[in-house]
Image (cartoon, rainbow, N blue to C red):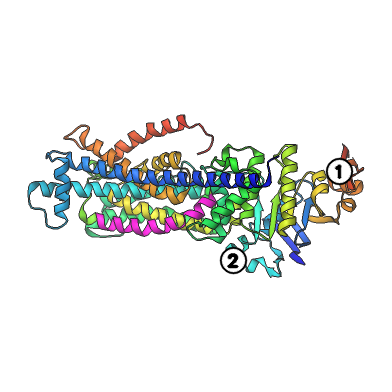
């Protein structure tokens, strides 16, 4: 069943077009990877889906309902967003940060159920020991897990990830991606992630959308999208793509002059 | 490998442990709030005994108690009820109001330097008062000329910033820069006004701007406390949203908070609160800046607790400062505004120095 439908979406900053004619459909339990060079419009698209930005053209339907018509709180109960990094200026404990994910669901007081939920997420992401630490004291990988926990306490149907692995070492990259993949499967969440690392995209995404200059250049499974021809055209980089365990493995050779 | 049941019990105890820690964390916050409240009572008791007419602490409390049921008759009763108590209560109200306004402004602007000064509110009030004192011109006639003028001009920066927000998005940067611009405009206007006026009027205007609790009276306390109550409730109600906004605008939006509208709403309320206080006291600085920081260091950044905590702690700070200001070179009574600045400056430097973290 189609969970999220992006229809002909266009967005411009002032008069500079950033997105043009984007159409994507996404079903539950599916993990979609958006790849493309810097400035291709990946992050902008993610922000449009969460209404952090408002697209000037097209519509985005969640369960058949246009998100423009939805109340902000209602949208926040359905879509979770995981940012690249934090910019917390004042102190906040990990527990309180994760509890913020309950904001769309609660009034002024948080209940026992909310507390239990936070504890469950902390345990699931294996960050219980940091519960009372300040978020700013954690490493990038630990922070990323906190953000995932916060987004999951929102109980979203759609999860948006903006470069979830960009600040992480190789071990944390795999850990974080495994966690996301499992959750998407278990909870039937539809996930969209903007990601730079083509090999992580190849390994974890069910489907890949390749963007270039604000438009969709190609879409499909990893083997059909991550080809030397496509990558050369979009990134201006010569690559070899051997098959590794049934998935394309991208080996960069040199930039095209 | 631990067996299945052991793992489950392990998980349970770990959870219980975190829950226990979290409860303790909240308990500590409540304890700090109670401690601040106690501090206010102690300082108020001491403050009421100090002055040219000697009265002991026990006498003060019994006079206050009796005064609740009958009009003050003896000299002691009149001194306490008509002179010292209004001053103390105004100190408490002003401390609470300024500290809460500062807390919320720092929160919505995500800026540790934000305070009622930053957005030009104090400068506006100063200009309004100077206009009333020097030219006797203003919006309100009669005995409320200065107060009314200070109140209205204190709100002008907020309305200008609101107007700007129609054309530019209400980001913290826009708001702070606009506030600083207004601060300069008001300062220049006040200076111009003073440059061309009589020395006596300049002195009076200047005294107003330093800020003191000397003008406190029972007549002033009522409107000031109404403003405080009316503003406190919506600020506390919005504390969750301000918490969420602490994580950044994008996160706040994704958690369902209408960031720009909330920012403007809180700014209006916080300005109203500041204006409602400083129109009676003049511009008392640093309480709104220092009290929130000191409280954050002790109890963390959760605004649900930080708002009451910094309010009460700010009240204790201001009351303490005023008590020192009244006695340090008695019989001369220094305006509390001078002392808060003298106290606040070094205190703030100390806080910056001992800060171990890179964030606030």
Circle on res. B322: none
Q: Is residue A97 left or right of residue B192?
A: right
The answer to which quarter of the image holds residue B223 is bottom left
Task: Between residue A120 and residue B300, name the one nearer to us.
Answer: A120
Tell me the SS state at disc 1.
Answer: loop
Q: Is residue A210 left or right of residue A128?
A: right
Q: Residue at x 65, y 59 (%)?
A: A156
Both labels 1 and 2 in a single chain: yes
Residue B191 higher or lower than A111, as above or below: above
Q: Residue at x 72, y 50 (%)?
A: A180
Contact between labelled residues 2 and 1, with CB atoms less than 8 Å apart: no
Which label lies toward us, 1 or 2? 2
> Disc 1 versus disc 2: distance between alpha carbons?
42 Å
**Residue matched to label 1:** A236
Q: Main secondary structure of the magenta part?
A: helix
Dot 1 or dot 2: first in sequence order is 2
Circle on res. A71: 2
Residue B316 higher or lower than B255, as above or below: above
Residue B317 higher or lower than B168, as above or below: above
The answer to whether residue A225 is magenta is: no
| Mark 1 surroundings within 10 Å by alpha-carbon count, few (fewer than 14), some (14 through 19), many (20 or more) | some
Q: Residue at x 63, y 58 (%)?
A: A155
Total tally of numbered discs in the picture: 2
The answer to whether residue B233 is magenta is: yes
The x, y position of residue B129, in whole percent, is 30, 50
The x, y position of residue B93, in whole percent, is 30, 50
Callout 2: chain: A
The x, y position of residue A15, in whole percent, is 69, 56
Q: Is residue A252 visible?
A: yes
State the extent of the magenta-drawn residues as a range: B221-245
Q: Is residue B8 left or right of residue B114?
A: right
Q: Residue at x 90, y 53 (%)?
A: A224
């Amino acid at each position: 069943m189609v969970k999220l439908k992006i229809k002909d979406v266009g967005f411009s900053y002032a008069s500079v077009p950033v997105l043009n004619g984007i159409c994507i459909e996404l079903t539950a339990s599916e993990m979609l990877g958006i790849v493309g060079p810097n400035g291709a419009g990946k992050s902008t698209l993610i922000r449009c889906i969460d209404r952090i930005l408002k697209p000037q053209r097209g519509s985005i339907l969640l369960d058949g309902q246009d998100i423009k018509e939805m109340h902000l709180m209602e949208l926040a109960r359905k879509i979770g967003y995981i940012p690249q990094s934090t910019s917390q200026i004042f102190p906040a404990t990990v527990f309180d940060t994760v509890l913020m994910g309950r904001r769309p669901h609660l009034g002024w007081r948080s209940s026992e159920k909310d507390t239990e939920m936070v504890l469950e997420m902390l345990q699931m992401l294996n960050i219980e020991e940091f519960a009372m630490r300040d978020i700013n004291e954690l490493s990038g990988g630990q922070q990323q897990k906190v953000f995932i926990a916060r987004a999951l306490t929102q109980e979203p149907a759609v999860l948006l990830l903006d470069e979830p692995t960009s600040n992480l070492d190789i071990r944390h990259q795999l850990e974080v991606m495994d966690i996301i993949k499992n959750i998407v499967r278990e909870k039937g969440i539809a996930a969209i992630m903007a990601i730079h690392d083509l090999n992580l995209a190849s390994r974890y995404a069910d489907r890949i959308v390749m963007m270039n200059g604000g438009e969709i250049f190609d879409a499909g499974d990893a083997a059909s999208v991550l080809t030397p021809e496509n990558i050369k055209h979009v990134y201006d980089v010569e690559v070899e793509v051997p098959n590794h365990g049934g998935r394309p493995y991208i080996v960069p050779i040199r930039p095209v002059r | 490998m631990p067996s299945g049941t052991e793992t489950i019990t392990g998980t349970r105890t770990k959870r219980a442990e975190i829950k226990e820690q979290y409860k303790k964390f909240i308990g500590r916050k409540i304890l700090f709030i109670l401690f601040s409240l106690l501090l206010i009572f102690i300082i108020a008791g001491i403050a009421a005994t100090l002055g040219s007419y000697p009265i002991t602490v026990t006498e003060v409390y019994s006079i206050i108690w009796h005064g609740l049921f009958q009009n003050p008759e003896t000299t002691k009763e009149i001194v306490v009820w008509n002179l010292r108590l209004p001053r103390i209560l105004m100190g408490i109200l002003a401390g609470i109001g300024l500290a809460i306004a500062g807390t919320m402004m720092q929160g919505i602007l995500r800026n540790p330097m934000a305070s009622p000064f930053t957005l030009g509110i104090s400068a506006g009030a100063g200009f309004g008062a100077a206009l009333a004192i020097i030219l006797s011109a203003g919006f309100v006639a009669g005995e409320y000329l200065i107060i009314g003028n200070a109140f209205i001009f204190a709100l002008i920066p907020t309305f200008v910033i609101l107007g700007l927000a129609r054309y530019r998005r209400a980001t913290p940067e826009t708001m702070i820069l606009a506030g600083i611009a207004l601060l300069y405009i008001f300062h220049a206007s006040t200076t111009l006004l003073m440059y061309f006026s009589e020395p006596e009027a300049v002195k009076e205007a200047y005294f107003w701007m330093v800020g003191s609790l000397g003008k406190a009276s029972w007549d002033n306390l009522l409107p000031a406390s109404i403003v405080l109550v009316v503003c406190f409730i919506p600020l506390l109600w919005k504390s969750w949203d301000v918490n969420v906004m602490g994580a950044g605008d994008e996160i706040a939006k994704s958690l369902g908070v209408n960031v720009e509208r909330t920012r403007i709403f809180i700014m209006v309320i916080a300005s109203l609160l500041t204006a409602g206080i400083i129109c009676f006291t003049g511009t008392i600085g640093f309480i709104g800046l220092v009290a929130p920081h000191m409280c954050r260091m002790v109890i963390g950044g959760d605004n649900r607790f930080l708002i009451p905590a910094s309010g009460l702690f700010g009240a204790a700070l201001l009351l303490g400062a005023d008590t020192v200001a009244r006695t340090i070179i008695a019989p001369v009574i220094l305006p509390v505004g001078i002392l808060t600045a003298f106290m606040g400056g070094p205190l703030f430097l100390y806080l910056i120095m001992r800060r171990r973290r890179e964030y606030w």
